[in-house]
Amino acid sequence: MDAELFPRSRREIAPGAVHLPDWLDADRQRRLLEDCRAWARPPAGLRRVRTPGGGTMTSRQVCLGWHWYPYGYARTVVDGDGSPVKPFPDELGELARAAALDALGGDPGAGGAAYDIALINFYDADARMGMHRDGDESSDAPVVSLSLGDTCVFRFGNKESRTRPYTDIELRSGDLFVFGGPSRLAFHGVPRVYGGTAPPELGLTGRLNVTLRAGGF
């Protein structure tokens, strides 16, 4: 069916954690995808992240503004080609602030943070992301997550452990997920990607997740 019988609606998953379906329209998705493709090119391009224990993440990542590596930030790709990290565009900062305001309204930190970090992860159909916390930033500003391409299962958990209780949410192309306040340090991950579910008109095979953060460094 081209249209859903019951349109998806805004949903609060936990205090400070909100899912807004279809937040990006089709044109904005296409433009963001074009930008992601440019950012993914070397130098300081898309790479596989290796963990201190010797493992390799199945998604691939490129960073803007500050380069994230396990578990810190640098101005160069210290675990890759050593190039300076690509700059963080003002447009992404404006997008992050608008997203936080739409999701959290007048909550503390929503819309007022100086966003300066983008982590862009590319997932093919076999990629996963284990449960983790976004805890390497000094700022407690809300994290803004935008999805492009294939649908995924996004698992949003608790602050105490990687295990239950957690909630599984289906994130589709154009969806927004924001978490801040009491949920800012909640564990979260991606246990599954549904290959071949991206909107055909987008022209993307796989899933892109654009995560926007304020470093506060």
Image (cartoon, rainbow, N blue to C red):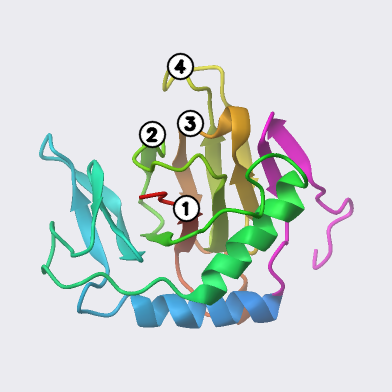
| Mark 3 lies on residue | 185
Q: Which callout, 1 or 2, points to the residue nearer the camera?
A: 1
Q: Which mark is residue 132?
A: 2
Q: Earlier in the sequence, mark 4 or mark 3?
A: 4
Helix, strand or loop under label 1 = strand
**Who's the residue at 46% across and 63% down the image?**
208
Dots 4, 3 in contact, CB < 8 A: no
Q: Earlier in the sequence, mark 4 or mark 1?
A: 4
Decide if residue 88 is in sight here: yes
Label 2 and label 3: CA atoms lie apart by: 9 Å
Label 1 and label 2: CA atoms lie apart by: 15 Å
Position above or below: 37 against 104:
below
Helix, strand or loop under label 3 = loop
| Mark 4 lies on residue | 160
Closer-to-camera residue (42/202): 42
Helix, strand or loop under label 4 = loop
The amino acid type of the residue labelled 1 equals Arg
**Pointer 4: residues within 10 angstroms few (<14), some, or many (20+)?**
few
Decide if residue 171 is in sight here: no
Q: Position of residue 175 (x, y in %)?
A: 65, 57
The amino acid type of the residue labelled 3 equals Leu
Q: Earlier in the sequence, mark 2 or mark 3?
A: 2
Closer-to-camera residue (148/78): 78
**Pointer 1: residues within 10 angstroms few (<14), some, or many (20+)?**
many
Q: In the drawing, does residue 180 fall left or right of residue 136?
A: right
| Mark 1 lies on residue | 213
Closer-to-camera residue (73/125): 73
**Who's the residue at 77% across and 44% down the image?**
106
Q: Earlier in the sequence, mark 1 or mark 2?
A: 2
**Who's the residue at 57% across and 59% down the image?**
146
Please tell me whether the stretch drawn in magenta is mainly helix, strand or loop.
Answer: loop
Tell me the magenta residue range. Answer: 1-25
